[in-house]
């Protein structure tokens, strides 16, 4: 039996996950999405997916309920759904940054199988990376079911401490934005060096793809692959020296630390709501 996966919130990340699931052959009739904005739902409805602006309608259908609203509205979204969720007992998968299992459980009335997942937007092209954490109530079959959903859209890895979800967020949840940032910067620099925008963009994106494919398939580290590009006395050496002089590695360390700290801050700011 295929389980129905319901999503509360039909924004960027739910779209990426649903797009990935559909592309992997998950049937539209076994998906359901709720969002407060009807405009967010049209495209899904047109694909034969059940949609509603009433979150409760999706909870009624869901064997697996994916919580995909912003952390800031999670408490107000979940509390009215508690009686229905308690009656239906779906597996809960929260993709929200920061919000702890204990808060989700409290808002939904307690004692539920809750998985925290931290996916990323490349799920849309089945190249996602997701970190998962299971609460003690999640049995091995439910763990497998949660993993199967996220596996449909890319790589999955379990962490055994909930706090490590903030670290996953810093590396891969937010990570696509860092790579897009580097792409923006390289395209801009290419244009400054005289390339037209189309050429700078095509060269940058293909280089990103090629470097990622090499790093994934190589049996040596990214550091070694970098060394192989960097001919002594050559051109790359100058660029890397410039990055080192600007303390780029330290900047990444600071940025990822700030990202993970924001996850903890969200938990403290929002997770304590009654
Ligand atoms: N974007 C990313 O790369 C990632 C995001 N996440 C997590 O995923 C979650 C969703 O993020 P993202 O998809 O980017 O956010 P979006 O804002 O794109 O999506 C959230 C959706 O929920 C809707 N919504 C707001 N209030 C309600 C409500 N009361 N009931 C139902 N739907 C509601 C929003 O509508 P409206 O716009 O009108 O408010 C919006 O369409 C967040 O918790 C985030 O931490 C995790 C990993 C990666
Ligand atoms: O920026 C955010 O808060 C979300 C969580 C990870 C990626 N986007």
Image (spheres, rainbow, N blue to C red):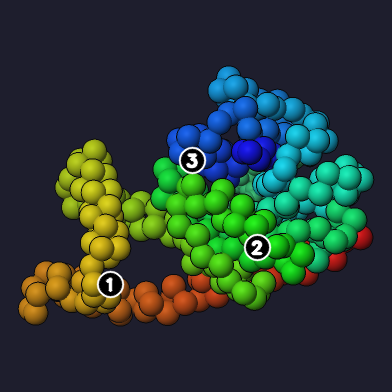
Task: Identify the mark nearer the N-term, 1 or 2.
Answer: 2
Which mark, by number, is residue 222?
1
Looking at the picture, does residue 245 appear above or below residue 83? below
- Residue drawn at 85 percent across, 66 percent down: 272
Numbered mark located on residue 271 in the image: none
List x then y, in percent, for residue 75: 83, 53
Residue 163 percent location from the top left of the image:
65, 74
- In the rendered image, which quarter is residue 116 located in? bottom right
Q: Say which of 98 and 235 sits in front.
A: 98
Using the rendered view, name the quadrant where residue 28 is placed: top right
Expressed as whole percent of the image width and height from the top left, the position of residue 107 reads: 86, 56
Left/right placement of residue 35 relative to residue 124 reads right
Q: Secondary structure at mark 1?
A: helix
Give the residue at mark 2: 140
Looking at the image, tell me whether mark 3 or mark 2 is earlier in sequence order: 3
Q: Cα distance, mark 3 to mark 2?
A: 24 Å
At horizontal 51% and vertical 71% (from top left) the residue drawn is 256
**Where residue 143 sits in the image (x, y, percent)?**
63, 59
Q: Secondary structure at mark 3?
A: helix
Q: Which residue is mark 3?
A: 20
Q: Earlier in the sequence, mark 1 or mark 3?
A: 3
Which of discs 1 and 2 lies nearer the camera? The answer is 2
Using the rendered image of the protein, determine whether residue 169 is visible from the camera's viewpoint: no
Specify few, some or many for label 2: CA neighbours under 10 Å numbering under 14, 14-19, or 20 or more: few
């Amino acid at each position: 039996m295929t389980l129905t996966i319901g999503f509360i919130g039909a924004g960027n990340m739910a779209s990426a996950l649903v797009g990935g699931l559909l592309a992997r052959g998950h049937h539209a009739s076994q998906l359901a999405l709720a969002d407060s904005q009807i405009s967010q739902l049209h495209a899904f409805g047109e694909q034969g997916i059940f949609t509603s602006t009433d979150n409760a309608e999706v909870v009624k259908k869901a064997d697996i309920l994916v919580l995909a609203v912003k952390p800031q509205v999670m408490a107000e979204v979940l509390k009215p759904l508690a009686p229905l969720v308690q009656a239906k007992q779906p597996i809960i998968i929260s993709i929200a940054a920061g919000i702890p299992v204990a808060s989700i459980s409290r808002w939904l009335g307690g004692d539920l199988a809750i998985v925290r997942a931290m996916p990323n937007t490349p799920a849309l092209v089945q190249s996602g990376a997701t970190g998962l954490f299971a609460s003690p109530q999640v049995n091995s079959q439910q763990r497998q079911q949660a993993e199967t959903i996220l596996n449909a859209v890319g790589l999955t890895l379990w962490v055994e401490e909930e706090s490590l979800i903030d670290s996953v967020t810093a590396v891969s949840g937010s990570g696509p934005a860092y790579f897009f940032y580097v792409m923006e910067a390289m395209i801009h620099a290419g244009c400054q060096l005289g390339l037209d925008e189309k050429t700078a963009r095509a060269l940058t994106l293909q280089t990103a793809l090629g470097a990622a494919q090499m790093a994934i398939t190589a049996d040596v580290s990214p550091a070694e692959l970098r060394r192989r590009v960097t001919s002594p006395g050559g051109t790359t050496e100058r660029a890397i020296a410039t990055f080192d002089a600007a303390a780029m590695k330290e900047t990444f360390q600071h940025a990822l630390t700030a990202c993970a700290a924001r996850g903890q801050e969200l938990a403290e700011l929002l997770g304590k709501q009654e």
